[in-house]
Image: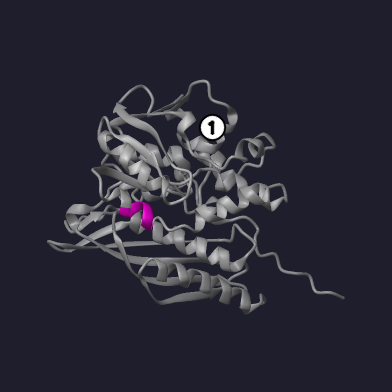
Amino acid sequence: MEREKPVFCKGGGCTAKLGPGALRRVLEQIPKVRDPNLLIGYDSSDDAAVYRLSDDLAIVQTLDFFPPMVEDPYTFGQIAAANALSDVYAMGGEVKTALNIVCFPESMDLNILGQILLGGSEKVREAGGVLAGGHSIADQDVKYGLSVTGVIHPDRVFANNGCREGDVLLLTKPLGVGIVCTASRVGEASQAAMDLAVKSMSTLNKYAAEIVKKYRTHGCTDVTGFGFLAHLCEMLGDQFSAEIDQRAIPFIPECPEYVEEFYLTAAGQRNRNHVQDKVRFVDCSFAVEEILYDAQTSGGLLVSMEAEDGERALEELKTLGLPCGIVGRVVKRGAEAVVVQ
């Protein structure tokens, strides 16, 4: 009797993250750390921790891991690594070292694990970092990611909440990879949609970060499991609001069709529940709403930048070959944190 083939991809990526509301309730119970050298910690909902070692050197620390969202192990390794490395770039840092984080069933073919680690190591090397080791445990399901250390000058950190009134908001990758991967798992995603999703997820944010560093960037985050709107709300805090132009939002073209077929994720609905009271949609379709709530894996950078620099930065970002755009602007605080129209 033929042995049943183990299921590799059951649905993962950043859709596997805990919802932002549940996570916030847990973190509120943890005592805050008081250290003048901890420039950014978990209490600011930022992308990575930043700790000052000297007047001109700080380390950036982050980790991320999740289950597969694609069937190919090598591609999964690339995406998981690119996603973990992204947090360093979102802070404006430079990657130095990485450690593998592995959960793997003992009953599964170890060649699959080898392909995952190969894909991950190639992305670390592309980032200019050194893969220095890692840790593995036996688990029922596959999970993979990295713990990453980077460096940055303490005065040049891109905090996620540094935006200013009048800034333009740039998004460096298309939205919708969660929706596309969901459609793919039931065999309904086109090859073109999946190819663009994989290209976006496996592209390092290193290149976009190098571009935005040239300009007067005030705030930056990467759009991952909490979706565009929740990450944007974190950037705005209680001080500012944002006006978003729905026509300027870059997304994978097939997404509206997949939304109409209800290929949605639970993570997207958790994101909606978390921030829907802060968002007002004006003449927007259900598809636009879902795309903006969709949990992204290895998503693009969301950048708050001086308005005069926006168009020049955008022209450079377009050379990277992924859909991107100036999606809105930061305004004085209004009744809602975000208005999409």
The answer to if 172 sits in the magenta stretch is: no
Quick check: 197 above or below 163? below
Where residue 188 appears, as percent x and y from the top left, is 71, 47
Residue 30 seen in the figure: no
The residue positioned farthest toward the right in the image shown: 1
Where residue 231 appears, as percent x and y from the top left, is 41, 42
Where residue 299 appears, as percent x and y from the top left, is 46, 50
Near-viewer residue (181 or 273): 181
Near-viewer residue (127 or 59): 127
Relative placement, left or right, of 180 versus 335 is: right
Where residue 124 appears, as percent x and y from the top left, is 42, 69
Q: How is the image coloured?
A: one colour
- Residue tagged 1: 289
What's the residue type where badge 1 is placed?
A: Glu
Quadrant (top left/top right/bottom left/bottom right) for the N terminus = bottom right
Residue drawn at 52 percent across, 74 percent down:
118
Secondary structure mostly seen in magenta is helix
Identify the magenta region.
206-210
Relative placement, left or right, of 54 versus 247 is: left
Q: Residues within 10 Å of mark 1 (few under 14, many from 20)?
A: some
Count all numbered tags in the image, as a single digit.
1
Q: Secondary structure at mark 1?
A: helix
